[in-house]
Image (cartoon, helix red, strand yellow):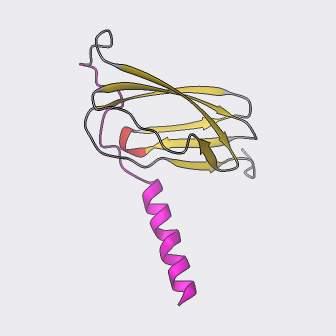
Amino acid sequence: MQTRRSVLIAILLLVGCATTQLFEAVPSTLNRETAPKQIIEMTAEHFHFTPEELKVKEGTLVTLRITSIDGSHGFALGAFGIDEELKENETKTVEFYARRKGSTNSSARTFADWDI
């Protein structure tokens, strides 16, 4: 029974990481001058992002500045079509528009063990 549960959890995690893009990350019709903005500094280390949870208001243009501290990592917000590789000590900027209330999952992965 434990093996079945582990397999089910693994399948759910894989499916969750392959979310199809549902929204344009930043709509071309968005007026960047008047849209409320929020900038969030993040770090990636040991398959973990800090902060772990992001809270933004509906109708906000969100800018994430993500710095990888320990090796290469990946960051994805599948619903927004965002999938970035973060190299060690590199900071990437990711933008998305929080057009409505709700939540989305992000995923983390490491490239440290892959021969890329």
- At a point 55% along the width and 78% down the height, the residue shown is 6
Residue 69 placed where, x, y %? 73, 36
Q: Which residue lies furthest to the bottom in this view?
A: 1
- At a point 70% along the width and 40% down the height, the residue shown is 72
- At a point 70% along the width and 49% down the height, the residue shown is 46
Residue sitting nearer the eye, 24 or 99 = 99
Residue 52 placed where, x, y %? 54, 45
Is residue 20 within the magenta segment?
Answer: yes
Up-down: is 38 above or below 114?
Answer: above
Residue 13 placed where, x, y %? 49, 63
Q: Residue furthest top?
A: 33
Residue sitting nearer the eye, 101 or 66 = 101
- The part of the chain drawn in magenta is 1-29
Residue sitting nearer the eye, 87 or 97 = 97
Please indicate whether residue 52 sits to the left or right of residue 55 in the image: right
Up-down: is 110 above or below 28?
Answer: below
Please indicate whether residue 77 sits to the left or right of residue 103 in the image: right
Please indicate whether residue 8 sits to the left or right of residue 79 in the image: right
Callout count: 0
Is residue 53 within the magenta segment?
Answer: no
Up-down: is 65 above or below 45?
Answer: above
Q: Quadrant of the C terminus?
A: top right
Dividing the picture into quadrants, the one containing residue 37 is top left
- At a point 49% along the width and 62% down the height, the residue shown is 14
